[in-house]
Image (cartoon, grey):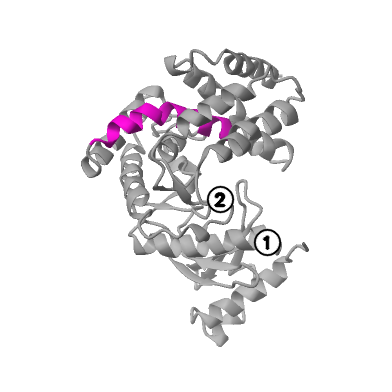
Amino acid sequence: MSQLSDLYILQCALGLMLDCGMVSSGEAQGLLSKNHCQKICSDGSTRKFWRVLRAGKALCIIAAPAGRSNAELAESRSAWNIGKHLIVKGVPVPELFGWNEENGILLFEDLGDVRLHDIIRGPEGISRQGGTAGRDFYRAALSQLANMQLAGAEDFVLTWCWDSPRYDIPLMVERESGYFLRAFWQGLLGQEDNGGVEEEFRDIAEVAGKARADFFLHRDFQSRNIMVKDGSVRFIDFQGGRLGPLGYDVASLLIDPYAALTSQVQEELLDYYVSLIAARLPGSEKDFHKYFSFLALQRNLQIVGAFAFLSKIRGKPFFTTFIQPALLSLRERLANSSFSEYHRLRALVDRGLELAAT
């Protein structure tokens, strides 16, 4: 599919702003100038983003797919439908102003530039020795996450999902452990012999797949997808949402390599989250603890695969920095007694750390 030019996207976005009544025809004349329309770099996404200013103040964010492939347009449709649903359910996502179904262009609220990641990695952040900044934001994020998981699942329509409607065993095997092998072990490290680890991956996925999975799942719930505006947390990049288990998004936040939270902070925040869920779903904590480590391991595998892919294939060196921390987190997770029988995987990760260091 052909790529959409920046000029085409901006002209279409301006037309959408006019249709939505966001600007008048008189105001529209100068909005595409560099003074009013600033391109924003994305992390791992191929989508394009711009910030639109009016009289020096934020008007909206333009989000557009790079092209018009079925997958790109479906992702945009999911962002619109899931976003509208989450707003109705009281989830703190950006307001959605407009959507063009034909080209996938979206207009949504500008939440600024401050991410949770920026706060916690600052000189006083909880990722630093003795730092405390960010703890309250994490608690707020977990509280809002619990609401999103429960309320977001109510009236959720599976056809809104653009790539898969549920987090299940086939997804774990193909796009998490399989992703780890293809993108990291083979793609980045150039290794072919994986020691027959697929059998262990399948077993781990089958255990994780026993967790109750009828909750709303964000699937990329980490510190760079949590904005902080006017003292409150707001969630972005929810277009990959689907139904799934409680533990996955919590694990995503706590083992997030961008944040590098200490084990002590992770345990403290995990206890806080479990108390929230126990209050809303009495008795659910037993099931949660039973499968949390396996879901966290699945997320760990996905992270390493994604960082390897984005580093090598997409050519984004930003992600290279986080591969070793993600591997160390994976090795630490495998030290849990729940994984004592997975000798092949532990050996593979140890070897991966040695090779990645070079």
> At 59% across and 58% down in the image, what residue appears?
75
Quarter-wise, where is residue 310 in the image? top right
> At 61% across and 15% down in the image, what residue appears?
344
Magenta stretch: residue 286 in it?
yes
Measured along the vertical axis of the image, is residue 252 above or below residue 332? below
SS state under label 2? loop
- Seen from this angle, which residue lies furthest bottom? 26
Q: Position of residue 196 (x, y in %)?
A: 67, 19
**The N terminus lies in quadrant:** bottom right
Q: Amino acid at mark 1?
A: Asn
> At 21% across and 41% down in the image, what residue appears?
279
Marks 1 and 2 sit apart, C-alpha to C-alpha, by: 14 Å
**Residue topped by disc 2:** 164
Quarter-wise, where is residue 99 in the image? bottom right
> At 43% across and 52% down in the image, what residue appears?
235
Which one is nearer the viewer's eye here, 283 or 217?
283
Closer to the chain start, of discs 1 and 2, is 1
Q: Position of residue 208 (x, y in %)?
A: 46, 31
Q: Are marks 1 and 2 in contact (CB under 8 Å)?
A: no
What segment carries the magenta color? 283-303
Magenta stretch: residue 342 in it?
no
Q: Amino acid at mark 2?
A: Ser
**The C terminus lies in quadrant:** top right
Q: Nearer the viewer, mark 1 or mark 2?
A: 2
Which one is nearer the viewer's eye here, 115 or 102?
102
Measured along the vertical axis of the image, is residue 26 above or below residue 101? below
Which one is nearer the viewer's eye here, 324 or 86?
86
**Residue topped by disc 1:** 70
Q: Position of residue 84 (x, y in %)?
A: 43, 65
Magenta: predominant secondary structure element?
helix
